[in-house]
Image: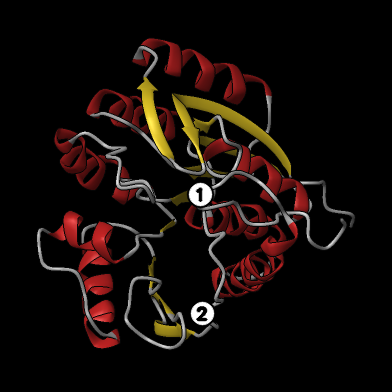
Amino acid sequence: MTHPIPNVLTIAGSDSGGGAGIQADLKAFSALGAYGLSVVTALTAQNTRGVTAIHTPDASFLTAQLDAVFDDIRIDAVKIGMLANADVVRAVAAALRRYRPVHVVLDTVMISKSNHALLAPDAVAALRDELLPLATLITPNLPEAAALLNVAPAEDENAMVRQGEALRALGARAVLMKGGHLNSADSPDWLIEDSGPLRLGGPRVPVKNTHGTGCTLSSSIAALLPQRESLTGATADAKLYLTGAIEQSVRLDVGHGVGPVHHFFRWW
């Protein structure tokens, strides 16, 4: 039987510089064979040097976007990124409970690479209590995992695994602890699921163009979940794709700060 091209929805903020947020998500979806849809949670004035302003639409408009998409289109997977505030978190959680998509990848976006807060402090508890239990997979980096657990960031892989297991105990079906912040020669991630912890190794690529890597990884997993037999397979293939996009980012000439990865390196 021929499987249909998956429809994958990103619920995230817009990056006017094109390197992260819904722009990165839609590029990753397209690169990995999925049809992308988007619900915009926030508008950012942003470039490779940083975020200069954020506008958050009313939560009722967010709900209208969600209802418009789910009422008409089969959604095979959802990726969630920047949510801005507690009202947005609650509106997204309500929609997920209402429509029950099969796959939900939650990227716990809190702080931009330029150190700009992307999630209000009161929204952290709402994200932890309302969205984590609805997620197939959450993909925190080490500072985000620490903020969700109210502990110090992990400094080694044993602590990464312990914190991943603690996050999974809060309700997420699986946790991908991203090791990019570790002080190590490589960049290991740990996938924590029913079968136990699994180390996914990877090289630490020496380039400056790393803007949108977290968005790209989570959206790549969401794009691949409907196309792979397991979460492990989707995650491993997504990590391999991201490594290539980072390595080939040197071919791009975008901005004067931390540039984007090359989502279409396999075609351009």
- Dot 1, crowdedness within 10 Å: few (<14), some or many (≥20)? some
Whether 85 is drawn above or below 110: the answer is above
Picture quarter containing residue 193?
bottom left
Q: What residue type is labelled 2?
A: Arg
Residue beneath label 1, please? 257
Picture quarter containing residue 169?
bottom left
Q: Which of marks 2 and 1 is nearer the N terminus?
A: 2
Q: Position of residue 12 (x, y in %)?
A: 48, 35
| Label tally | 2
Q: What residue type is labelled 1?
A: Gly
- Where disc 1 sits, the SS reads loop
Viewport quadrant of the N terminus: bottom right
Q: Residue at x 54, y 82 (%)?
A: 202
Foreground of the two, 181 or 177: 181
Q: Residue at x 55, y 83 (%)?
A: 203
Res. 13 in view: no
- Where disc 2 sits, the SS reads loop
The image's mark for residue 99 is: none
Residue beneath label 2, please? 204
Foreground of the two, 50 or 28: 50
Q: Which residue is drawn at 44% across and 27% down?
A: 44
